[in-house]
Amino acid sequence: MARRNKKNRNKQQSNQKKNQPKTQQKKADEPKEVAENLESNLDKVIVDNSISEVEIKEVKKEEVKTTTEASYKSAQELYHKALAIEKVLERRKSDYEKLKEKLDSEKKVLENEKSENEKLKTELNKTLDKYNEELTEINQLRVEGVWSSVIDKKLLDHYQEKLKEQEKTLLNKIAELNSKHSEYISALAEIETKKLDVEKEYHLKFTEKSKRLEKIYQEKFTSKENELHLLSKDIDEQKRLLARKEKQLSYEVEDFEDDKKFLTDKARNKVEQEIEGVNQQLQNLKDKNKALGNELKSLNDELKYLGDYKAKDVISELRSKEKEIFELQERLATSPDILKIDDLKKLQKEKNDWQNRLRDINSQLNEYKSRYENQKLQIGEKERLEFQKEELEQRIKLQQSALEELKEEVSELTRQTEDKITFVSCSEMDDKYKLQPENLIQNNINKGWIKEIQQAIAQVTENRLFYDENTIRSFIAGLSMSRFSILQGISGTGKTSLPKAFAKAVGGNFGIVEVQSGWKDRQDLIGYYNTFEKKYYEGKFLKLLYMAGTPKYKDKPFFIILDEMNLSHPEHYFADMLSIMEETNLEKQVLTISDKVKDKPRLMFDLEEGGIGLKVPQNVWFIGTANHDETTLQFAPKTYDRANILEMPINIEEFEIKNVDLSKVTIPNKEFINFTSSQKWNKNHRALNYLEGNFKNICGKFGIGWGNRLQKQVKTFIPVFKALEGDDANALDHIISSKILRSIKGRYDLQETTLNEMKDELEKNFNKEFKGEAKKSLKIVNNELSRLE
């Protein structure tokens, strides 16, 4: 039997080796598949694997979650079809696994039966041997004649025949079991081999085709995504550059005005100084020329003493006299007695006089030469200065003409700007939204209103948004607690849609401000004033804030949504609004817009400290949305402290949408404010006592504390939450999770014992005190415990 199994395995292996080259050749001959023939290839896989359309439809009914977002509808269908085929193959694989397990169990049963049969065979063989021994002894005794009278030969033969029949039956049963076992082993090996071959072949095919399909569409999607990202990045960069250039241009224009005035005065002063200097130089040259003329005249008078003699003749005569004196001296040396002493002295004196006169004449001649050269240079300098004077006069004329042109241009620009409106958009709203709406619906918030508003929110949205009642309660109660809310959560949880849908449901209005990365100050949010153009460039935020205060909108709730507000630091560009919302006196909630200008819209007014301001309308709430990923920034603690933080839940259970008369849930702003302000805090409420008890001691171990602002928020939030048919447990759980325990998220200095102590406090004492679970708070604690494991 073992040989037979081995022979079957060898036969199967040889068949696999024969089929393997064919499969490899088939794969080598396959052409490169492209996106256009993927559908036909999937159909071929369906035919090769005998996959029915019923199986595919059953799989398609299930929710198929993909990690790759297809760029086109046809590609998405092909991808889901491929996933469905993969699901069918996986099911078949599961069936093969179950069949294998069943065969393995039957194999074990057969092996157990075989083992028992072997034991039975051994026992029967022993019994047979014993019977044979007894029979041999009986035969021996019979031969010896001892038992011949007792044992009958027929009885012995019958007994021996019966034993042989039993042995034969036993051998047949063993052979039958061996045959059945061999069949099971062969079937199991065949099924296993077939399963492995099919699984390997189709897994390779499907993996290869799936990878190609995924690669093709991933490349297309990545390419489109990169193009859109680059395009968006370029647009943002161009916007920033344009805004920066506009600011720079305004600054340059201001600098130009200042430089123009400064340079004009400087040029005028410089030209006047240069003209004065040139005139002074000319006067000095005239004085020098006059002095040189006097000196030349005196020299000419001195030269008259020489008579008609020239300087060269005088020098020649002096040299001849020197020679004559030298000869006389020699003669005197040789014959001193010839001449008289007086003559010698006379000659010596004449000689000295001529030498002195010669030196004087040489010195005067050198001086005359020097003066002559200096006079020539001064004459050249005079000509150069006269040329410079003419050039400067030409430049002065050109600058004066350019100055006149600039004056005319500035005057023209000034005349043009005087006719422009400073706040263009806001001034247009004064006329556009000056009429108050007629027949404003006056509804009240009463019992059951929260369920109606839930249905209304789902009804007014195209995508049928489903929000649970606690989320809507937390949002509305948060509006009473602070005029600034932050909605956090992953993409697709309805952060932006909730305030939009709520505004539509209650008959209010909204506007979206797309926050850009790189916003640094208030000018990026509200706009800036261009001093050169005498115009204020209003930002979208300022336009919406002004619109909310116009007669048409002032009596309705108005929501300004700051989308992706943590792309930049809100503490920088939103700092003024954070400070204004801290002001308890509503009359002092004023946003400073600009310095004083020649004209202003109706809702803006002059401030005592200078400039103009805009009062923040009482019907405005600011809603910020935030994602937390590598492209965004973290909020500062002061931003979290001043806002209502709402973590948007995931996978909200859908409910049946009923038609709601929107006119019955519409409320004016006055009714909403009256409803929130009329909910008074009960001094006997246990929330503050709980927060100040053992819970605060545990928070102290985390380094967490709070002040009067949190107590005020608790006293405002919980009554409104309960008035909307909520309970104490969910209300306080929202405060604890969003205001207190949010600060422990992601910290690395947390102790597991302290976290477990907080967990026990929330699970036992909180539940006992408020008859409900602190689900949001426990989720934060459990996440931190899981992170420490």
Image: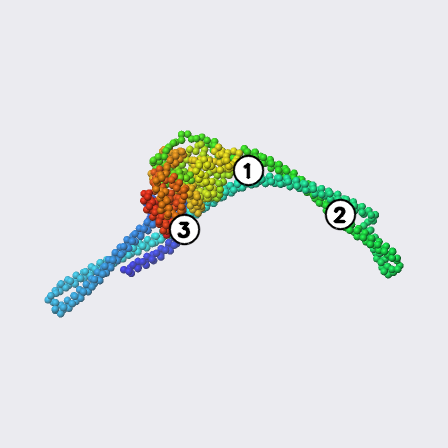
Q: Nearer the viewer, mark 2 or mark 3?
A: 3
Say few, some or many: other residues with alpha carbon within 10 Å of mark 3 (under 14 / 14 to 19 / 20 or more).
Answer: few
Q: Earlier in the sequence, mark 2 or mark 1?
A: 2
Left/right placement of residue 263 relative to residue 537 reads: right
Q: Nearer the viewer, mark 1 or mark 3?
A: 3
Q: Which residue is mark 3?
A: 748
Q: Which residue is mark 2?
A: 372
- Spatial separation of the CA atoms under disc 2 and disc 3: 96 Å
Image quadrant in which the N terminus is located: bottom left
Q: Quadrant of residue 401?
A: top right
- Spatial separation of the CA atoms under disc 2 and disc 1: 62 Å
Q: Is residue 133 above or below residue 309?
A: below
Frontmost residue, 104 versus 157: 104
Q: Is residue 164 above or below residue 251?
A: below
Spot occupied by residue 645 in the image (x, y as percentages of width and height): 40, 42
Q: Secondary structure at mark 2?
A: helix
Q: Which residue is mark 1?
A: 532
In this view, the residue farthest toward the top is: 438
- Residue flagged by tag 1: what amino acid is it? Phe
Say few, some or many: other residues with alpha carbon within 10 Å of mark 2 (under 14 / 14 to 19 / 20 or more).
Answer: some
Frontmost residue, 320 versus 769: 769
- Residue flagged by tag 2: what amino acid is it? Tyr
Q: Secondary structure at mark 3?
A: loop
Spot occupied by residue 170 in the image (x, y as percentages of width and height): 21, 60
Q: Secondary structure at mark 1?
A: loop
- Residue flagged by tag 3: what amino acid is it? Tyr
Q: Earlier in the sequence, mark 2 or mark 3?
A: 2
Say few, some or many: other residues with alpha carbon within 10 Å of mark 1 (under 14 / 14 to 19 / 20 or more).
Answer: some
At horizontal 48% and vertical 44% (from top left) the residue drawn is 518
